Amino acid sequence: MNGAWPDGAGELGLEPPQLTSSLIARLELEPGGVIMARLAPQLESGAALELAPYAVMAATSFEWRCRATFPPDVLRTLPCEPLPAP
């Protein structure tokens, strides 16, 4: 590690088939360390969850911001903000 977020899962030696499960249709590692999970259709069609790191404590540490496309009643139970539709 060099103190920078990887630009994609390939930089970590991971391929897309390794990043799925029965609940996650697709998981992407985007530039800046953003993790985007596209949920399986049986959970919620087109649902997505985004975790994005942001610097805190004069950039000596980081925390995560959560945004999701879940229905408002579900979002109220999570520490997530609404995620704009693509």
Image: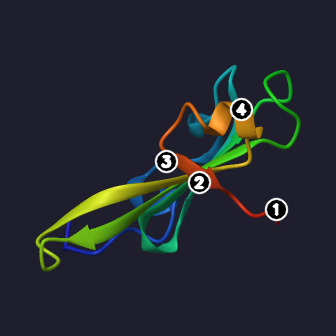
Instruction: State the mark number for residue 14.
Output: 3
| Nearest to N terminus: mark 1 or mark 3 | 3
Q: Secondary structure at mark 1?
A: loop
Q: Nearer the viewer, mark 2 or mark 3?
A: 2
Where residue 12 sits, quadrant-wise, is: bottom left
CA separation in Å, label 4 and label 2? 12 Å
Front residue of 73/44: it is 73
The answer to whether 71 is drawn above or below residue 15 in the figure is above
Q: Is residue 23 above or below residue 53?
A: above
Quarter of the rendering occupied by the N terminus? bottom left
Q: Nearer the viewer, residue 44 or 2?
A: 44
Inspect the image, locate mark 3, and give the three-letter code of the amino acid beneath it. Leu
Three-letter code for the amino acid on which mark 4 is drawn: Asp
Taking the spot 88% from the left edge, 35% from the top edge, the residue there is 45
- Which callout, 2 or 1, points to the residue nearer the camera? 2
**Residue bearing the label numbered 4:** 73
Q: Residues within 10 Å of mark 2 (few under 14, many from 20)?
A: some
Residue 75 location in percent, x, y?
63, 39
The three-letter code of the residue at mark 1 reads Ala
Distance CA(mark 4)–CA(mark 3): 34 Å
Q: Residue furthest bottom?
A: 58
Q: Is residue 55 left or right of residue 61?
A: right
Camera-near label (4 vs 2) is: 4
Label 2, on which residue? Answer: 81
- SS type, badge 3: loop
Q: Which mark is residue 85?
A: 1
Instruction: Give the spatial CA distance, label 2 vs label 1.
Output: 12 Å
